Amino acid sequence: MSVSQGVMVVLRRDLHLAFRNRGDLINPLIFFMLVATLFPLGVGPDPDTLLVMGGGVIWVSALLANLLAMDSLFRSDFEDGSLEQLMLGPQPLWMIAMAKVISHWLVTGLPLTLLSPVLAIMFGLPVTALPAIVATLLLGTPLLSLIGAIGAGLTVGLRKGGILLSLLTLPLYIPVLIIGTGGIDAAVSEMVWSGHLMWQGVLLVLGVTFAPLAISASLRVSISG
Amino acid sequence: MKWTFFHRMSSPKWFYDFSGKCLPWVGVLALGCIATGLTWGLLFTPPDYLQGNSYRIIFLHVPSASLAMTVYVGLAITAGIGYIWKIKLADMAVSCLAPIGASFCALALITGSIWGKPTWGTWWVWDARLTSMLILLFLYLGLVALREAFDSKETASRACAILAMVGLVNIPIIKFSVDWWNTLHQGATIKMTERPSMALEMLVPLLVSIAGFYLFCLFVFLLRLRAEIISREQRTSWVRSLLGAKS
Amino acid sequence: MSQLPFLSVSGLTCERDERILFESLDFTLSVGEILQVSGPNGAGKTTLMRVIAGLSLDFRGQINWCNQPVEDDRPGFQSSLLYMGHQPGVKSTMTPEENLQWAMGLHRSLTREEIWGALEKVKLRGYEDVPCYQLSAGQNRRVALARLFLAKQKLWILDEPFTAIDKLGVAELEQTLVDHASSGGLVMMTTHHEMNVDYSGFRQLVLGEKQ
């Protein structure tokens, strides 16, 4: 049994579970749309204001929606003992963690990214900015999943993990947010935005390198505690 | 190379005895430095030619800001040592350092804000430095909250150690991105007036004050760590005999 | 490796929140042996199981698998380990068949016949495609126990495997453990139930006696 096969088993299982609880699959998306809808209601529908805010609002909503889905990443597995089984499998824990992060991204980050153009049009962002929005989210949301999983791993053993998870994770999301919105802003004002994309790529590479180790360390602590 | 010193130092009992001996000296030195630095700075240095007397808050602000950052780095390194070599004392130190760092960070933000009112005419600007400091405060508060959330102190220390190390990796990235964000939105902020260099008569009391704050921080840290050691080791024989001897 | 696998533990001390659960524990477990860890509540039975499985980090001492410290080759140790904790590790939204498919899937790939055979042995044939939330607690435990029939792992660490299992099931399970041990396996388990086995390799380890 090779290691990659084990990872595929976990990935398939998580996707399978996600599709079995369809509510969990769609709720973050509804939340994403809903949060974004609150902004025009809160600050007024002036198109100029919305144009300035649009990129930021999309990113903040994506960030919150991602975080909302994050708490359940390890929780149900922790509660029914499956996490212990995953940890004691012959695969290294960081690979299992990676598989779970990928499945989390596939069911939240990716749909959010695909849905973002709709929001962009509702906020009156120019069509030329759409590729930037999709591209920054495409590179940024996996990083959100990676960072969030560290927090989820740390708080999984706690009864009330949810709010603590946001407290731990949101400050770490800031660079992703800044670079992502920066890229969209550049695209809206018709400047070059490939630089932002490269920075996001750099962060993503860093995240993929270090986050799995931190996630597995945090899971070990939570399971042990 | 033998690590005997390292190991001896990491024994809670040895550390408790040793820090007990140092504590009064550190306290007296801290008090002396802070008193000297602050009276000198607040009463005897000339007013700034641009900001008048309002600049004097730097004698509080700069040491706090500097400590806020140093304590985090120290905390994360201690956390790393504790995590890798499984040293109990380092775990305890992490738990003690987080609230201290958070306090200095809050102090730096508050004094910065008070300084900002006469200088910029507003309590708060989304200046790169202020924003980074605010994020640092959130990182600290996250650590404190995480520590409080666990029932078991050992699990809490381990979890905090991981979070602190993740935070340390992130801090340069956050700092860089906030600076960059700030230059991007330059129009919205007021540029800080860059002083060419500080006059010697201001710099010396500032340095004394910084030294005093560092010593004070060390003093508080040792106090907390000693309390933590006693609380965690209360079942060991040496703590029992210590407490028995006192009561 | 010509040597038979065995587990040896030396100087194992476990402290939880400054309370010593057990101190300087030494024992070995060789092929063909069933070790029942017993002791009063709070003696540290579950903790001992978790320490040996590698779930709990709060311990001092040495755990060797085939003369090699387990921390040197965790994946290697874990590929010969089957652990069952208090929670059965059964996903309630999945069916017994799916549960077994992924639980054992980490170790090897299974055919549907193998899974059905294992379900047959735990008397769950006919429930393959019923979601586990519709099954009783005992049936859920049986889903977890069906793993024993699919396992190729040598070392079984079972924490209270008899929970929620009926009398007949317990007898069958005891037989399963004996079969595993006599065919070259190692079993380490906790239970409050009186083990009714007549097997030469059966031993007991009692925790919490010194107090």
Image: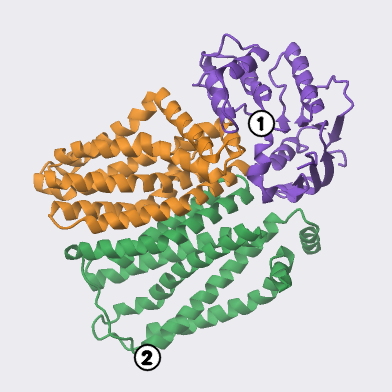
* Image height of B192 relative to C107, above or below: below
Q: Residues within 10 Å of mark 1 (few under 14, many from 20)?
A: some
User: Tag 2, which chain?
Assistant: B
Residue type at numbered disc 2? Leu
Q: Which chain is purple?
A: C
Picture disc at residue B200? 2
> Chain A colour?
orange
Q: The residue tagged with tag 2: helix, strand or loop?
A: helix
Image location (x, y in percent) of residue A5: 51, 35
Please identify the residue farthest to the left as the structure is shown: A47
Residue type at numbered disc 1? Gly
Q: Which residue is mark 1?
A: C85
Q: Where on the picture, by quarter, is residue B169? A: bottom left
Image location (x, y in percent) of residue C152: 68, 29
- Which residue is drawn at the image coordinates 76% and 60% (left, top)? B239
Q: Which quadrant of the rendered structure holds the N terminus of chain A? A: top right
